[in-house]
Image (cartoon, rainbow, N blue to C red):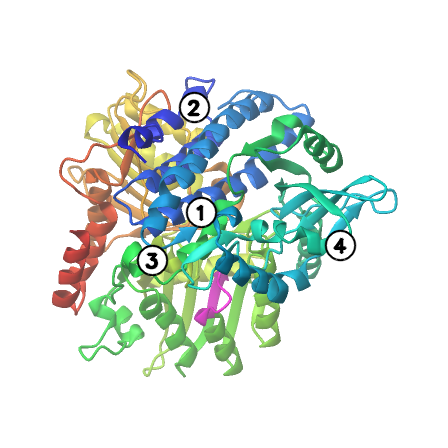
């Protein structure tokens, strides 16, 4: 792709969603989400990224859009059908949907052209072919014929549509072929649907393992074997996205809640259709049939001039071609948690002496958080382990450690959030496995999701004294996401924090009515009011005030209004917001002392940090935790935010914030019109490379790791 053509695919041209907001005070939340997806897509445009990384970002962009339609667009459609009016930050649902369609169309067009004109030919030039069936030679076709006969044909189920066969249900996110077949004897034309099996790879590898063909094209080339004796007149791929919002009754008891969620999971498969993706060449006849039978409007149709569902590029990214990928930064173990011989330190002895801050993925999740739970499960002095599980992976060592602890007679309690969106089925399975092992499994409180990331270990030492050890984090207890999500966690034996977590777990598992805590800020009880008070304290200082926040989302209007007031009072405010931001920065006389930036890179920025003060009127107050600044987090979820007070750890948090604010490689800035702009590179400060280097300097393997980080950053 030429430089001029690539320039057309930049965020400046495509992501103007924020400009469409209809209020001066707030930026539309839904369009802000699409702006984030555009920043991800910009990584796929960037020629400095390795080729398979660029393909990966195309896949991530597709998955972000899938979630956006399943959750956000479905909600807007429900509001429109219910006749609800405009929100404070946007137009009416109908106006928002119009803006969304315009923006998504531009972004998908960018993705399609980028794949066809740049990434696909660039990969082919280095031996990774993404071919069509028509481009294959005889030998490659013969190989795919064998693959089809052995692996694909046995699992296909063609479904005819005629008076005796009603139109089949099209499941959520399934890829399908719409086929017209003709009876050569009678001339009768019939419609049939062939579902592309979701358990098979989206792209089928050829014999060399480095060239691929879309699965639906392999199936399309063999339709005659599915409809023997008939002529295949035409075929077109299509894909349906459905509403997946789960809304079981909030007042269910635990056993009933589990059953209710399972019922809603079954209903999810039959949710209302919210998007229909079709091949750009589809005929009006077939499109009209799909619209009628699926029950969707023409305004919800998205024509794509290329392969549907490029989320399937993850299978290509899995190719063993390290020359086409970023080398992983080496995860290290903080020296306090590692002995000189490289073996794990005694975590309880370490935490008796001082707190430890861990920063993933630069600090290894396996040798820090997982090792903490593993040692707790094995230590004969540990009496109890309590943990919240919002999302975890199928092979989680933490789950296995909890089971072993219960089998050894320890009191183990796990609060499992069975309504964690898209992880409900996995969480139900783990909840039952834990229960069978004797773990006390508790589900969320009525009307509240438990989103806090907390663990509590109660241990009796050799002197007979009982102490409490805690982990309070910003990320899930999930070893898979811990390798790609940036998160923070505090390991501590602070008695006040231990008492707070004890009270919080009693609230979660029992009937405690405690609404105040010694140190931690807890939603929905104290967090909102505490954040508002902290902002107001800085506003009272005027130009001596200082606020820095790093969050994933900032859309709560009460918090935004408080930040506006602080800005008008003279407070300097810097915000690092990864995804959605409803605040308009830089408006003269209103928010002209507020800056907003976003860091987008190889890792998903996921930590939440808040800092209040500039050090001139007292110590800067730092907090980390699980909560974003959204109404749902502040009012309808159980969240835990902890102060970080040890000077050395507070200095590390300030270091992270300083790096984010100095970034001119991965950073974007937001202006008052709602437009995101890439920060020009002058100093070459890249947040994630810099933080990897800082983790290396703290490692016992400092020399080896520092050299590797410097080499890769270069």
Q: Earlier in the sequence, mark 4 or mark 2?
A: 2
* Mark linked to residue 483: none
Closer mark to the observer between disc 2 and disc 1: 1
For the residue pair 210 and 315, the one nearer the viewer reads as 210
Q: Is residue 624 left or right of residue 211?
A: left
* Mark linked to residue 26: 2
Circles 1 and 4: CB atoms closer than 8 Å:
no
Closer mark to the observer between disc 4 and disc 2: 4
Residue at figure coordinates x 16%, y 69% from the top left: 701
For the residue pair 281 and 621, the one nearer the viewer reads as 281
Closer mark to the observer between disc 1 and disc 3: 1
Q: Which residue is mark 3?
A: 489
Verify whether residue 597 appears in magenta. no
Q: Earlier in the sequence, mark 2 or mark 1?
A: 2
Query: Mark 1 and mark 3: span between their CA atoms?
Result: 29 Å
Query: Mark 3 and mark 2: span between their CA atoms?
Result: 32 Å
Q: Earlier in the sequence, mark 3 or mark 2?
A: 2
Residue range of the region highlighted in magenta in the rendering: 386-398
Q: Report helix, strand or loop for mark 4.
A: loop
Dot 4: few (<14), some (14–19), or many (≥20) neighbours within 10 Å? few
Q: Quadrant of residue 581?
A: top left
* Mark linked to residue 228: 4
């Amino acid at each position: 792709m030429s430089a001029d053509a690539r320039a057309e695919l930049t965020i400046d041209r495509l992501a103007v969603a924020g400009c469409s907001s209809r209020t001066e005070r707030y930026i539309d939340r839904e369009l802000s989400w699409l702006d984030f997806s555009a920043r991800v897509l910009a990584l796929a445009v960037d020629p400095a990224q390795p080729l398979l990384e660029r393909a990966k970002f195309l896949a991530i962009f597709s998955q972000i859009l899938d979630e956006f339609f399943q959750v956000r667009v479905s909600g807007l459609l429900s509001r429109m059908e219910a006749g609800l009016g405009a929100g404070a930050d946007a137009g009416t649902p109908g106006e928002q949907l119009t803006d969304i369609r315009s923006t998504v169309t531009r972004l998908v067009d960018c993705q399609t052209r980028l794949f066809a004109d740049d990434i696909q030919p660039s990969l082919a030039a280095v031996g990774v072919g993404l071919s069509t069936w028509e481009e294959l030679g005889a030998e490659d076709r013969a190989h795919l014929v064998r693959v089809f006969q052995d692996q694909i044909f046995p699992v296909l189920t063609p479904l005819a549509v005629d008076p005796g066969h009603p139109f089949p249900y099209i499941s959520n996110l399934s890829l399908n072929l719409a086929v017209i077949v003709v009876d050569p004897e009678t001339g009768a034309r019939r419609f049939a649907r062939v579902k592309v099996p979701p358990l098979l790879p989206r792209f089928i590898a050829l014999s060399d393992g480095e060239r691929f063909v879309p699965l639906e094209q392999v199936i399309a080339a063999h339709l005659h074997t599915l409809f023997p004796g008939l002529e295949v007149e035409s075929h077109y791929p299509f894909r349906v996205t459905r509403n997946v919002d789960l809304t079981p009754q909030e007042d269910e008891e635990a056993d009933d809640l589990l059953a209710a969620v399972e019922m809603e999971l079954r209903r999810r498969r039959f949710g209302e259709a919210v998007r229909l993706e079709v091949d750009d060449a589809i005929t009006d006849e077939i499109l009209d049939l799909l619209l009628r039978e699926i029950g969707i409007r023409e305004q919800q149709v998205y024509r794509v001039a290329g392969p549907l569902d490029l989320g399937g590029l993850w299978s290509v990214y899995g190719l063993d071609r390290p020359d086409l990928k970023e080398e992983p930064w080496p995860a290290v173990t903080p020296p306090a948690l590692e002995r000189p011989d490289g073996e794990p330190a005694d975590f309880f002895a370490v935490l008796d002496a001082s707190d430890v801050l861990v920063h993933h993925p630069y600090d290894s999740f396996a040798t820090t958080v997982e090792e903490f739970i593993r040692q707790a499960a094995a230590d004969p002095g540990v009496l109890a382990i309590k943990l919240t599980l919002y999302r975890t992976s199928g092979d989680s060592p933490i789950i296995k450690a909890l089971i072993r602890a219960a089998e050894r007679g320890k009191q183990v309690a796990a609060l499992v959030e069975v309504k964690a969106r898209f992880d409900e089925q996995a969480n139900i399975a783990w909840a039952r496995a834990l229960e069978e092992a004797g773990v006390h499994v508790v589900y969320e409180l009525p009307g509240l999701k438990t989103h806090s990331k907390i663990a509590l270990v109660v241990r009796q030492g050799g002197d007979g004294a009982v102490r409490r050890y805690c982990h309070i984090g910003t990320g899930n207890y999930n070893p898979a996401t811990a390798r790609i999500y940036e998160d923070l966690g505090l390991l501590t034996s602070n008695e006040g924090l231990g008492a707070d977590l004890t009270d919080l777990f009693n609230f979660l598992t029992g009937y405690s009515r405690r609404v105040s805590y010694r140190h931690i800020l807890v939603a929905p009880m104290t967090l909102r009011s505490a954040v508002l008070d902290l902002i107001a304290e800085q506003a009272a200082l005027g130009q001596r005030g200082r606020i820095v926040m790093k969050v994933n989302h900032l859309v709560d209007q009460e918090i935004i209004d408080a930040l506006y007031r602080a800005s008008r009072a003279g407070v300097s405010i810097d915000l690092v917001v990864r995804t959605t931001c409803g605040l308009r920065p830089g408006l003269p006389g209103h928010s002209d002392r507020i800056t907003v930036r976003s860091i987008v890179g190889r890792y998903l920025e996921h930590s939440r940090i808040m800092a209040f003060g500039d050090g001139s009127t007292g110590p800067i107050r730092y907090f980390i935790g699980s909560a974003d600044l959204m109404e749902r987090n502040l009012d309808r979820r159980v969240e835990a935010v902890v102060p970080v007070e040890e000077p050395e750890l507070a200095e590390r948090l300030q270091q992270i914030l300083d790096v984010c604010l100095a970034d001119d490689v991965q950073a974007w800035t937001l202006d008052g019109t709602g437009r995101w702009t890439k920060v020009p590179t002058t100093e070459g400060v890249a947040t994630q490379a810099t933080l990897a280097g800082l983790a290396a300097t703290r490692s016992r393997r400092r020399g080896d790791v520092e050299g590797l980080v410097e080499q890769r950053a270069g």
